[in-house]
Amino acid sequence: MYIHMMTPSLTTGDAIGNYMISLQRVFVQLGVSVHLYADHIDPVYRHNARPTAAYHPTGQDILWFHYSIWGDNFAVLEGSKDFKVMDYHGVTPPHLMAHNPRLAAMCDKAIQSLPSYRGMFDWCIHHSDFARRDLERAGYTNFSKVHYPVDTAFFGRKEDETLAAMTQQLEYILFVSRIVPQKDVLSTLRVFAEVQKTRPQTCLLLVGGTDLLPTYVDQVRSEIQQLGIENRVQMTGKVSDRTALSALFRHAKFLICLSEWESFFVPAVESMFFGVPVIHTGEPPVSENVGDTGVVIDKRDPVGAARRINAIWEDNEAYSKLQDNALRRSAQFTDAALKEALQNLLRDWAAAFAARGVGSR
Amino acid sequence: MNSDIIDAIEFDEKQVDIESIMRQIRQYLAQKQETQAASRIEEPTFVMLDREVYDELYEANQYFDKIRVAPYLTPVRIPLFGVLWQRLRLALHALVVFYIDRSVDTQMRFNTHVVRVLNGIVRGVDTDLTLNRVAELERRMEALEKQIHALGARTDTTAPEAREGS
C-alpha cells in the first residue's frame, strides 16, 4: 500500500510543505511508502515530489489530499478509486487576501466547495478543534486530530553563532510571519510601543517576508515612525535558514501573534520548543495550541496589554512557569508524537479499509 | 563565524548599542538570505519531463493489461432456429477468442515489462543528478579558465620587465 500525498504547491518555508516532508519521514519509519505530488514544485523539492499528473490511482492505495486553497489538483479527486483522506488546514478568509484577487478567488472557491466534497472523502484530518468546526458545519463525519510537528531533527539542533552573539545582547519580542494585514502588524506595533514606554531597552524584531504587499509594509513603516519607535523596531525580511531562526527564537523573551485569522500558526509551536512564551489574543486556534504557555492580551487596548506583558516580564516566577509549560507542551508537537498519532490513524483506517475490501500489497 | 560582523559588535555589557546591534542583525540576515538566494539561482533549470509524458505514462499504466476481448454477438430474433444459430455463433466466437487470448497473454506479459521499464526510466530521470553535476563541472571549468586567463595576463605584463632586467 502506498500513500499518495497531494498539495497544489510544494514550497520551502511553507507550513504545509514542511508538514508533508515530516509526514513522509515519519511514515517511512512506520514502513509505509509516501509519494508526494504537487501542481507546482519548488526546485528544492524536485527529487522529493512528482507532478500531480504522475499520480496513478489503483483502488488499493491512500490519496492524502491537503485542503487549504483551490487548485488544479482537485480534478484528480473525481477519478480516484483510492481511499481518500482530506487533510484540512483551514482556508484563509478571502477578505484577508484582498491584496491578491487571484488568491482570494481560489480561497473563496475552496470554502464554497467544502460541503460538496463531503461524499468524496473517506476520512478527514484536522489540526485544531477550531478547524474541525469548519468540517462539521460542512457535513463531514469521520475525523482524526493530528498536531503539526516541529522538525526536531533539524530545528534547534544548532544555531547561527554569529547571529546568536548579537541576539543574546538584546531584550526583544519576536514576531515571525509575513508582513501582511492578516497578521495585524499594526496592532503589534501599538502594543509594543506601550511596552517600550516602561522598558526602553526592549526591541521588536519583525521577521518575515516584506515582498508580498509593499503598500502594507509602507503602512507599517509609517506607523513605526508615528509611534516614535524606529530605533527599537527592526524588520529583517524573510529568514528561511533554520540555524538563524533558532538563534532568533532561543534568545527572544516572547513571541507575539495578534493575527486576525490563523489556521494553526506554526511559529507558536516552534517558540514553545525553545521555551519562549507566546503573547496572543486568546482567539482559536492559537489559544488552543498554545494552552497554558501563553499570555493573553486584548489588542484593542494597547495600554492594558502592555501592563499585562510587563507584569509577566517582571515576575520571574510567573515567567519561568510559562517557560516550563512551553517546554512541556512542545512534546505534543514532536516527531514521536506525530508517529503515535499516525499509528492510531492507521489502525482507524485498517477498519475502514476492511469495510471497503481494500487489500494490502 | 563572520569575523567582520563579530568585530563590529559592541561587547561592552554596560553600554550595549541596541540600535547598532539591530542594524547589524538586519544586515547580517539580509546578507545571508541574499547568499542563499544567489546559490539557488545558480542551480540548473529544474529537470523534469514534459507533463504530457506523465499523462501518457498514466494512461499506459491504466490500459497495459486490459486487452482481453469478450465474444461480441449481435442478437438474432428468429424463433427456435435463432437460438441454435446463436449457440453455433457463440461457439465459433469463443474458439477465436481462445486463440486470441493465447496471444493476448504473451502481449500482456510484454506490456507489463515495458510499462515497468518506462516507470523505472521516468523515476530515474526524475531523480537524475547528472545534469546538476555537468552544470557544476561547467561552472568550475569556467572559473578555471578565468584563472588561467588572469595568470596569462599577469605573465604578459611581467615578461618585458624580466627581459629588461636580464
Image (cartoon, helix red, strand yellow):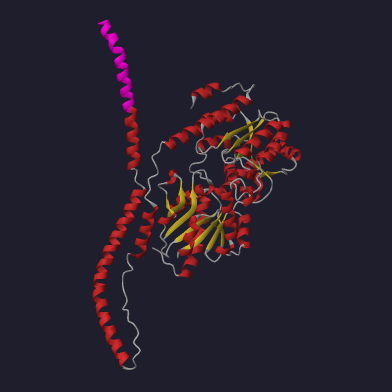
A167 drawn magenta:
no
Please name the residue shown 51% across and 45% down the image: A151
Classify residue A319 by image quadrant. Answer: top right
Tell me, yes or no, if residue B132 can be seen here: yes
Please name the residue shown 54% across and 66% down the image: A119
In the picture provided, is A11 more to the left or to the right than A270?
A: left
Span of residues in magenta: B144-166
User: What secondary structure is the magenta-colored segment mainly?
Assistant: helix
**Position above or below: B127 against A63:** above
Quarter of the image with the N terminus of chain A is bottom left
Please name the residue shown 34% across and 87% down the image: B76
Quarter of the image with the C terminus of chain A is bottom left
Position of residue A131 measured from the top left corner of the image (x, y, whole percent): 61, 56
Q: How many marks?
A: 0
Q: Return the residue nearer the eye: B90 or B7.
A: B90
Q: Return the residue nearer the eye: B141 or A310.
A: B141
**Position above or below: A250 against A63:** above
